[in-house]
Image: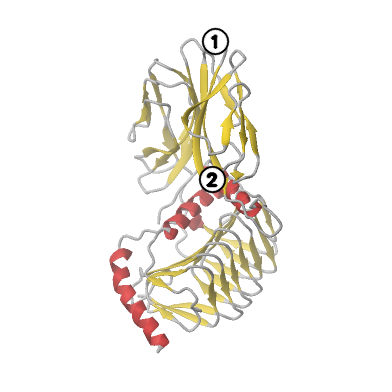
Amino acid sequence: MKRNTLLTSIGLATLLFSASAAFAQISLGTAQNFGVLGGSTVTNTGATTVNGNVGVSPGSAVTGFPPGTVVGGAIHSNDAVAQQAQNDLTTAYNNIATTPCTVDLTGQNLGGLTLTPGVYCFATSAQLTGALTLDALGNANALFLFKTGSTLTTASASSVAVINNGGSSCNKVFWQVGSSATLGTGSTFVGDILALSSITLTTGSNTNGRALARNGAVTLDTNNVNTCGVSICPIITVNPASLPNGTVGIPYNQTVSASGGTSPYAFSVSSGALPTNLILNSVTGAITGTPTTAGTFEFTITATDATGCSGSREYTVTITSPGCPAIILSPTTLPPGAVQQPYAQTIIASGGTSPYTFTIAAGALPTGLSLNPATGLISGAPQVSGIFNVTIRATDAAGCQGSRAYTIAILAALTPAGGPTLNIAGLTILMVLLAAAGLFVMNRLSI
């Protein structure tokens, strides 16, 4: 009776899901070209075969190839291709994470179930012991999304199979894993695993899907990793390599272009912001306007070609006050902190006439932190967690100014028995995420 009730609820969920599946778009971008992608390392033992690229970023270590074999791809060790794939993986992970659930399977073992297309959620961990059957109902485009709050674990010799799939061998099955995934010895798995932390394929486990880890390691041991729908985008280059600086009150006019793809291109600011009062023409790539605010501005321009492939380049442009030198603030980024933990970071200005006076031009520091106007020291103990945006301005002895926008991440501290302890694991993960958000990117693929 419990099983029949579950299948009935799943059937009702399918009717609800059919309305949303039409507009549910899950794109892996250039991560689609990877069979295995790690955040810290990729390690292999034994005669593993990976179909598609093998890569890692922001880590750089890929070991065990050979004896492992890469078919139809190459190894990318923290290069522009791996960096872009990690950016696209993050986008896909977040898209799945925000897709509404149709069935809550929390506490239910997946073994022995037959599921139809839908979004299946686990508040914490998901486990598979035995066989899971995914019935595509004759639809070659059927979509199955599985979302776990923490881990995904399959027992030894467990299996996932897709049936009634309309003649397609590549139905879309995605597993969004809130921490780490482990496929048991001899498992046969289906679907792309998008894990926040690590992925482990134990001895002899095989998967018809990708192993994509955002922050941690992918560990392989005599596995077969097969992928569907691999299509390589060309490398699209955005030029020029750098843009000139500008001056407040003086018109600015520079043009970016793109090459390597299929014209026409569409240009956009994909991260950061242009100098105040400048705009980007999405058709011509012209950046025009008259700057109104002095400071250092960091932004990324992305060019998307006629086929949906894209490439990007990061730029830094400093706008100075009339008759003033360029005053640069460093460092370029601020480290994260934790609630009730001491925080200290000094902003340094250069390029003008000392002494400098430091002020907050926009936004605000986290509660509990303060800025020393004479030394540029940000110090204190944060009182609340969150992501905080603040722009620091430095004014030199001659009245010339420069500024830089910063983001400060404050984590909630763990407090186990024995006293407060900084959440180092969470801090490390967030540092990686913040770093990945600004990485130089080269190409994009939409599927």
Left or right of 445, for residue 349? right
- Residue 103 image point, x, y percent: 39, 72
- Farthest front residue in view: 418
Location of residue 283 by image quarter:
top left
Disc 2 packing (10 Å; few <14; some 14–19; many ≥20): some
How many marks overall?
Answer: 2
Please name the residue shown 42% across and 36% down the image. 258
Left or right of 303, for residue 217? right
Q: Which residue is mark 2?
A: 384
Disc 1 packing (10 Å; few <14; some 14–19; many ≥20): few
Location of residue 310 by image quarter:
top left
* Label whose residue precedes the other's in the sequence (2 or 1): 2
Q: Which residue is mark 1?
A: 398
Please name the residue shown 60% across and 51% down the image. 429
Q: CA distance from mark 2 to mark 1?
A: 37 Å
Please name the residue shown 49% across and 9% down the image. 323
Give the SS element for disc 1: loop
